[in-house]
Image: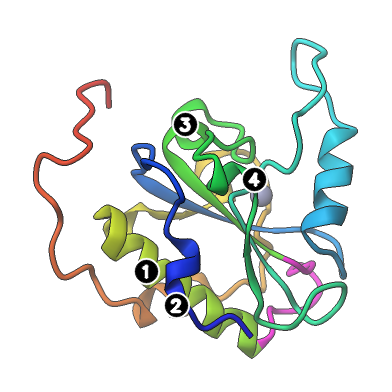
């Protein structure tokens, strides 16, 4: 069980982050390696192969990865843009968080939800992301992700707003 938020601190200067975009994997079981493999088999609109898992964090459900385990991916370690939302600003400025599972058929585990809360609170505090910038994939693209059984409202209600937003930090006039 990872209990150390220091593991989430990027090992290099961080990108500008404005959103968190929540996903389910759509598969009953999985882990960073299995999602990475399936994303590498995809091609973008220009026919280029994806460079690997499109998310920044994956949260396990006990099937393929420990229940409640939070793993940053290479995109987080290298502070790369995401490939997860189907929306350019949300790929550029959105932290892609994927919970393993198919939440159309079953809800996330309680450990996954507790872990998600902890991660979201840390990300919001660290990068000055407000609760309204925690979005579902379905909020930015035509998809059902993260599934009808994902308890979005309850999750948001459980997140404390960041104590302070670093004014002027990472300001980007484009958006
Ligand atoms: Zn998604």
Instruction: First in sequence, mark 3 or 2: give its number.
Output: 3
> Where is residue 59 shown, x and y percent of the image?
66, 69
Distance (Cα) linking label 4 and label 1: 19 Å
**Residue 107 is inside the magenta segment:** yes
Question: Which stretch is magenta?
Answer: 100-109
Q: Secondary structure at mark 1?
A: helix
Q: Are marks 3 and 2 in contact (CB under 8 Å)?
A: no
Per the rendering, the mark at residue 122 is 1
Q: Residue placed farthest to the left in the image?
A: 167
Give the label, 4 or 2, closer to the camera.
4
For image coordinates 73% across by 43% down, the residue present is 53
Distance (Cα) linking label 3 and label 2: 23 Å
Distance (Cα) linking label 3 and label 1: 20 Å
> Where is residue 79 shown, x and y percent of the image?
49, 40
Q: Which residue is mark 4?
A: 74
Q: Which residue is mark 2?
A: 118
State whether label 4 is within 8 Å of ligand 1. Answer: no
Q: Which residue is mark 3?
A: 92
Q: Is residue 93 visible?
A: yes
Q: Are marks 2 and 1 in contact (CB under 8 Å)?
A: yes
Give the label, 3 or 4, closer to the camera.
4
Foreground residue, 95 or 23? 95
């Amino acid at each position: 069980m990872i209990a150390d938020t220091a593991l989430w601190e990027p090992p290099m200067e961080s990108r500008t982050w404005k959103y968190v975009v929540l996903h389910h994997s759509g598969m009953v079981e999985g882990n960073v390696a299995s999602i990475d493999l399936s994303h590498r088999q995809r091609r973008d609109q220009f026919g280029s192969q994806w460079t690997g898992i499109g998310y920044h964090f994956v949260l396990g459900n006990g099937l393929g990865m420990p229940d409640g385990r939070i793993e940053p991916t290479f995109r987080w370690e290298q502070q790369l843009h995401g490939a997860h939302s189907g929306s350019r600003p949300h790929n550029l400025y959105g932290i892609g968080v994927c919970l393993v599972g198919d939440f159309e058929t079953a809800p996330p585990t309680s450990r996954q939800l507790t872990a998600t809360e902890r991660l979201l609170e840390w990300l919001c505090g660290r990068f000055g992301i407000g609760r309204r910038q925690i979005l579902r994939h379905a909020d930015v693209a035509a998809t059902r992700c993260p599934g009808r059984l994902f308890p979005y409202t309850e999750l948001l209600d459980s997140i404390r707003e960041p104590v302070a937003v670093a004014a002027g930090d990472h300001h980007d006039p484009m958006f």
